[in-house]
Image (cartoon, helix red, strand yellow):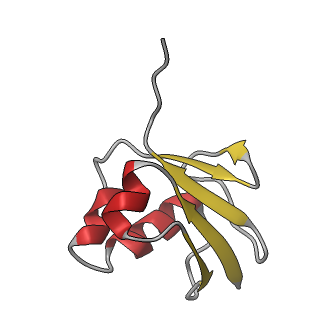
Amino acid sequence: MTVKVLYFASLREALGRPAEELALPTGVATVGALRAHLAARGEGWQALGEGRNVRAAVNQRMAGADAAVASGDEVAFFPPVTGG
């Protein structure tokens, strides 16, 4: 299963990339599992780690950790935004 992953704002800066196409390993089928898989890549990827305040969207709709991820989906990760 392949998905497109987008990184915004400070995550883009921390990870050094705006996006990537990613073939997901077996068992990575939710936003939370994808986030954990990415965080396990190493030091810089801890920006997505557990306890970090990161929001997600699947196909441009806000999504929680338990949201399903399917082949061809676009998954975006971004820090919370405040306005004023």
How many badges with numbers are in the image?
0
Q: In the picture, residue 37 is in which quadrant?
A: bottom left
Q: Position of residue 80 (x, y in %)?
A: 45, 35
Which quadrant: the N terminus? bottom right
Residue at x-position 40% and y-position 67%: 36
Q: Position of residue 11 (x, y in %)?
A: 39, 56
Q: Position of residue 44 (x, y in %)?
A: 25, 70
Q: In the picture, residue 42 is in which quadrant?
A: bottom left
In the rendered view, does 62 fall on the left or right side of 78?
right
Can you see residue 26? yes
Q: Residue furthest left?
A: 43
Could you say which is closer to the camera, residue 5 or residue 13? 13
| 29 up-or-down from 6: above or below | below
| 10 up-or-down from 82: above or below | below
Residue at x-position 28% and y-position 47%: 51
Residue at x-position 69% and y-position 83%: 2
| 42 up-or-down from 35: above or below | below
Can you see residue 49? no
Residue at x-position 43% and y-position 42%: 79
Q: Position of residue 62 (x, y in %)?
A: 66, 41
| 43 up-or-down from 31: above or below | below
